[in-house]
Every structure is written in structure tokens, then in C-alpha cells.
Amino acid sequence: MKADNCRYCSKGTDLAEVVADLEVSTLYLVKDQSYKGRCIIALNDHKTELFQLGPEELQAFSRDMARAAKALYEIFKPGKINYAAYGDTYPHVHFHLVPKYDGGKSWGQPFELPPSPENFASPEELAARIKEIKSKL
Ligand SMILES: [Zn+2]
């Protein structure tokens, strides 16, 4: 199921830019890069809960997430990647993939969820980061 007014169906770019289409999901780079490398991985279909995915789809989504996280880990060398799923307002299972750095912002705490336009990276920085992530996927 697809919907025109859905951020993830339309691959909207208000808060994030598409990095790559994966097996069953799309990887986005969040424009707020106050956590360097912050991404969102969103299932392409309208399903809100992991248990609604069939076994093959669930495995593919797990592979997509691990593949994306590995790329982020290799490039940005975080102390830990945080994985967070909320999704109250968009009907796609999606995870925030948020690299955290020892001693850096929110280390040892939940990351700050709402992206903030004053922390948006420049279009050039976003393009360079997207290119780098794509090269490691
Ligand atoms: Zn949608």
C-alpha cells in the first residue's frame, strides 16, 4: 500500500535525504547531523509493527538494518549505534540509527529525537556523507 501524503512512500526530503534503496527498505540520512551519521531506515510497505512482517521480509529488513549500521560503524567509528523505533505518526516500521560517541552529545543517555533545522548540515556536507555511506553499503 502506498499513499501520496506519506513521508516514506513519497521518499520525502523535508527532514532527510535518501541514501539508498535496500532489499525491503530505504535508508535516509537525517539532515540534522548533530549526531554524525544519523540515519533512518524505513520499511517500504505500510506495516507498523515488526510482527506484521512475514518471515522473509523480517529477515530482509534485519539484513538491511545490519548492513546500514555496519556502514555507519565503519565510516564514523562511533562508540555505539542507538537503534530506536517509535513511529506513532507514520505507518512504516522504521528505526532511527544514531551513532553516539564516547563523551559526545547524549552519551549514556537517550538521543534527542526531534531533528532541529538549526543543526541541518549543508547540502554539500549531506551529499558527501551520502556518497560515503553508499560506498560502504
Ligand atoms: Zn507510506
Image (cartoon, rainbow, N blue to C red):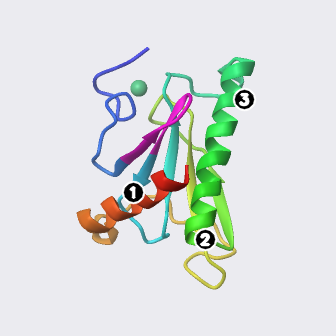
Q: Earlier in the sequence, mark 2 or mark 3?
A: 3
Of 102 and 137, nearer the camera is 137
Labelled pair 3, 1 in contact (Cβ < 8 Å): no
* Horizontal and vertical percent position of residue 35: 49, 69
Q: Is residue 63 visible?
A: yes
Which residues, given as a range, are shown in magenta?
A: 18-27
Q: Which mark is residue 14?
A: none
Report the image quarter containing ligand 1: top left
Q: Is residue 22 magenta?
A: yes
Q: Earlier in the sequence, mark 1 or mark 2?
A: 2
By secondary structure, the bulk of the magenta-drawn segment is best described as strand
Q: Secondary structure at mark 3?
A: helix
- Which amino acid type is shown beneath numbered disc 1? Lys
Q: On the rendered structure, is 86 left or right of 36?
A: right
Residue at image mark 2: 100
> Who's the residue at 39% across and 57% down the image?
131
Q: Is residue 6 above or below residue 67?
A: above
Residue furthest bottom as drawn: 103
Q: Is residue 90 above or below residue 34?
A: above
* Horizontal and vertical percent position of residue 25: 52, 33
Q: Is residue 2 magenta?
A: no
> Who's the residue at 61% across and 77% down the image?
101
Of 88 and 133, nearer the camera is 133
Labelled pair 2, 3 in contact (Cβ < 8 Å): no
Q: Indicate yes or no: mark 1 CB to ligand 1 under 8 Å.
A: no
Residue at image mark 1: 131
Q: Which mark is residue 59?
A: 3
